[in-house]
Image (cartoon, rainbow, N blue to C red):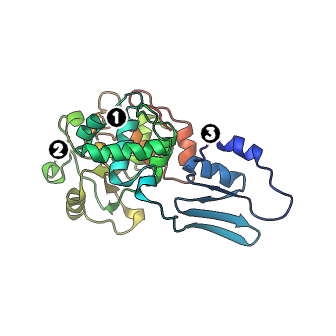
Amino acid sequence: MITADSLPGLLRGWSPSEAEGSKVVVADRITAEARTILKQVDWGWLDLRGHLRLTGPGLFVDSDVPAPEKPDADRQGIIGRVGIELAALLLLDPTRRIGVRAAAAALSRAPSSISEAFAALRGAGLVDEDNKPVVPGLFWELAEHWKPVGREVASIPMPGGRDDAALRLGMDDVESTVGWALADTVAAAVYGAPVSIRADHPPDFYVPDQVTLRRSVQLLGAAATAATRAGRVRVAPVSLVCARRMDATEWAAEEWPLANPLFVALDLAQDPGRGKEILDGWTPGRIGTRVW
């Protein structure tokens, strides 16, 4: 696996020939951070999980490609939904040593599934021998799997209104109930991340499930265009997003429950332009742990 930490030393050791042609790195895994560095120094790559980037005179390829077939026993990294859930759980408290059964109970998964997910993470060097996450490697690996699906809506509900129960807002006892979680750029600003947004920037929310998403679009209306949206609602990729929310009312002028900084950071990491820059300048203060 090639990471942002290992790449500079590797590049110094690779002396491309004077012959013209593309410079290409091939590895089983190349993290998102390492890919960004390769772009900056004009190297291409083949990530054997299934992505090829090549650049050169008159040449530009940046595309998913078929990954080599591997036996299930050889699969490593974040595998499937259980792998995504386990990675998120580990990154929420990276100093805590958590065993298979404790993780299975926290995620409502079978211990055998959690054991397999741990083995895949360990094989990729994303957790250590104590099952603690290797950071920031695991964060950036999870960021590549963080693909929430949602809809843009024409209006935003008013907390305390008649639709609270129907929409499962969960505004009472925020930190011990399930409900909507403010995320992405607006939440990042509340947490003090170096983002610049207008006062009327459309908020992004995570909702607990597909049923809540559909009901939200029905009651709030679908936005006619992206430019006219009042906000966006997305299904949380893992249930932990809506089950472990933060009440910011005591320290910020924000009535909406916030997603944990981990999940806000994963949202920011999806921006190929400024995401890495923002995360480089943000360390959570009151809540959360920097794992990026």
- Residue at 18% from the left image edge and 34% from the top image edge: 173
Q: Residues within 10 Å of mark 2 (few under 14, many from 20)?
A: few
Q: Height in image: 139 above or below 75?
A: above
Amino acid carrying label 2: it is Gly
Of the numbered discs 3 and 2, the one sitting upstream in the chain is: 3
Contact check, label 3 and label 1, Cβ < 8 Å: no
Amino acid carrying label 1: it is Ala
**Closer to the camera, 80 or 72?**
72
Badge 1 element: loop
Mark 3 or 1: the one toward you: 3
Q: Height in image: 237 above or below 220?
A: above
The numbered disc on residue 5 is: 3
User: Which residue is denoted by mark 2 in the rendering?
Assistant: 160
**Closer to the camera, 17 or 225?**
17
Contact check, label 2 and label 1, Cβ < 8 Å: no
Quadrant position of residue 27? bottom right
Amino acid carrying label 3: it is Asp
Q: Residues within 10 Å of mark 3 (few under 14, many from 20)?
A: few
Q: Residues within 10 Å of mark 1 (few under 14, many from 20)?
A: few
Q: How many marks?
A: 3
Q: Height in image: 126 above or below 219?
A: above
Instruction: Give the alpha-carbon distance from disc 3 to disc 1, as whole Å.
Output: 38 Å
The numbered disc on residue 23 is: none
Of the numbered discs 2 and 1, the one sitting upstream in the chain is: 2
The numbered disc on residue 253 is: 1
Quadrant position of residue 130? top left
Quadrant position of residue 111? top left
Q: Height in image: 14 above or below 93?
A: below
